[in-house]
Image (spheres, rainbow, N blue to C red):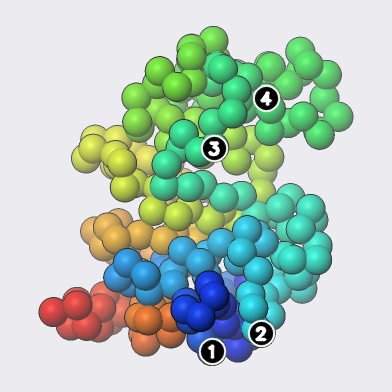
Amino acid sequence: MIEFADVGHRYGDRVVLSGVDLRLAEQRVAFVGANGSGKSTLARMINGLVPPTSGRVRVDGLDPSRDGREVRRRVGFVFANPDSQIVMPTAGEDVAFSLRRSGLSKRERAERAAQALAEYGLDGYADHPAHQLSGGQKQLLALCAMLVLDPDVLVCDEPTTLLDLRNKRRFVERLTGLRQQIVLVTHDLDLLESFDRVIVLDEGRVVADDRPEHALRHYRTLVT
């Protein structure tokens, strides 16, 4: 359960979020809204990347600001640009790096990384230079590096922004089959037909919260 209680956030004098009250229990939840609506800021609060300046956030009763390490064990985060997450020279090393606190030996981490890469469509790429992968492969690598830790929640902040249609479909197919609760921030409304819930933000406030068909109708009306 992810809870936002009267959450607000400011950057200096600029109000980004105001009075957000939400309880997220569904398997597939999406945040949509125009640029600057506050959706990415709200998503980043789930694992403590951004603290609220008012109100409170809880993940299974834990405060991401105070209990950051425990929350990050439960919540994985995938950014729009995978280059911001890739930190090691090869794909295998990058996934193994996620396991550095797992208690596994170096060889066991490498083996687990290779297995995870194969599972998520990157079989045989363990020794491939990570930054020479295609855009879609990099996004799959970023996803793999999070999922190898088996979090309960996966937050994806506009993960298909840099992808072509083929890689976008490949990435979404991977998301669809996951056991994790997914919280997706996106401008790509075509991805949301199968979601359980869509939350529309406008100027820092929730203005619609419903099944995709109804929430997206409200959003399209809002932007036109």
Name the residue carrying label 4.
96
Discs 4, 1 touching: Cβ within 8 Å = no
Disc number placed over residue 55 in the picture, else none: 2
State which tag comes first along the sequence, 4 or 3: 3
Q: Find the distance from the CA under tag 2 to the CA under tag 3.
A: 29 Å
State which tag comes first along the sequence, 2 or 4: 2
Q: Find the distance from the CA under tag 4 to the CA under tag 1.
A: 40 Å
Instruction: Name, please, the residue furthest toward the left.
Output: 224
Question: Where in the figure is residue 151, as x and y percent of width and height?
Answer: 66, 49
Judge from the rendering whether residue 164 lies leftward or rightward of residue 133; answer left or right.
left
- In this rendering, is residue 44 above or below 177? below
Mark 4 surroundings within 10 Å by alpha-carbon count, few (fewer than 14), some (14 through 19), many (20 or more): many
State which tag comes first along the sequence, 2 or 3: 2
Q: Find the distance from the CA under tag 1 to the CA under tag 2.
A: 8 Å
Question: Where in the figure is residue 195, as x and y percent of width and height?
Answer: 38, 65
When asked about the image quadrant of residue 121, the answer is top left
